[in-house]
Image (cartoon, grey):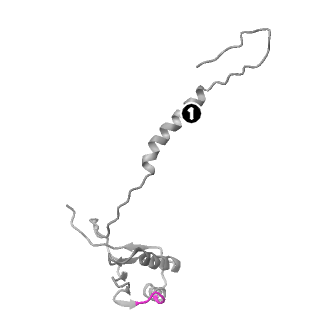
Amino acid sequence: MAMRLNDDLDTDGEMHEINVTPFIDVMLVLLIIFMVAAPLATVDVRVNLPASTSSPQPRPDKPVYLSIKADKQLFIGNAAVTTETLVNTLNTQTEGKKDTTIFFQADKSVDYETLMSVMDQLRQAGYLKIGLMGMETVAK
């Protein structure tokens, strides 16, 4: 640590030199932190869905399936519904229980906007438990 004492006893003036060593130490620590954290902040996402190798979860007694076909037609179970009647049909199927898990499956050619608009309708209706379904594959 560099420090200069005031050797001149005749003048009681202040020292005009700033000790920058602590400042440099802090800057070096921050540099190391940012060097470690910078690679963690980058995201390189390649999405090619749907397939899953996870084990299937047990099904409830009366599961509610919501499906979107390639032509964007909606189905609850085997019954076709429209976007306007989706919430009312779900309320009938679940008997008004908003904590029921909705098993949601969509054709892989369905665009993301359609998928998100249906999920947004479910969220606005109060159905927050949504199980996304995919094709089961064998683990290699």
Q: Quadrant of residue 19?
A: top right
Is residue 76 toward the left or the right of residue 52 in the image?
right
Is residue 17 toward the left or the right of residue 115 in the image?
right
Q: Please, what is the three-letter code of the amino acid marked with disc 1?
A: Val
- Residue 116, how many percent across, how many down? 45, 75
- Residue 17, how many percent across, how many down? 68, 22
- Taking the spot 32% from the left edge, 69% from the top edge, the residue there is 49
Q: Residue 123: say if magenta.
A: no
Q: Residue 82: say if magenta.
A: yes
**Label 1 neighbour load within 10 Å: few <14, some 14-19, many 20+:** few
In terms of depth relative to the viewer, which is nearer, 64 or 136? 136
In terms of depth relative to the viewer, which is nearer, 138 or 41? 41
- Residue 60, how many percent across, how many down? 35, 77
Relative height, residue 126 to residue 80 (above, below): above
Relative height, residue 29 to residue 62 (above, below): above
Q: Residue furthest front?
A: 16
In terms of depth relative to the viewer, which is nearer, 129 or 7? 7
- Taking the spot 21% from the left edge, 66% from the top edge, the residue there is 138
Q: Can residue 93 be seen in this view?
A: yes
Q: Which residue lies furthest to the left in this view?
A: 140
Is residue 4 toward the left or the right of residue 96 in the image?
right
Q: In which quarter of the image is the C terminus?
A: bottom left
Q: Is residue 62 visible?
A: no
Q: Is mark 1 on a helix, strand or loop?
A: helix
**What stretch of residues is rendered in magenta?**
81-85
Q: Mark 1 points at which residue?
A: 26
Relative height, residue 59 to residue 12 (above, below): below
Q: In which quarter of the image is residue 51?
A: bottom left
Instruction: Give the dominant element type of the magenta stretch: helix, strand or loop.
Output: loop
- Taking the spot 56% from the left edge, 33% from the top edge, the residue there is 26
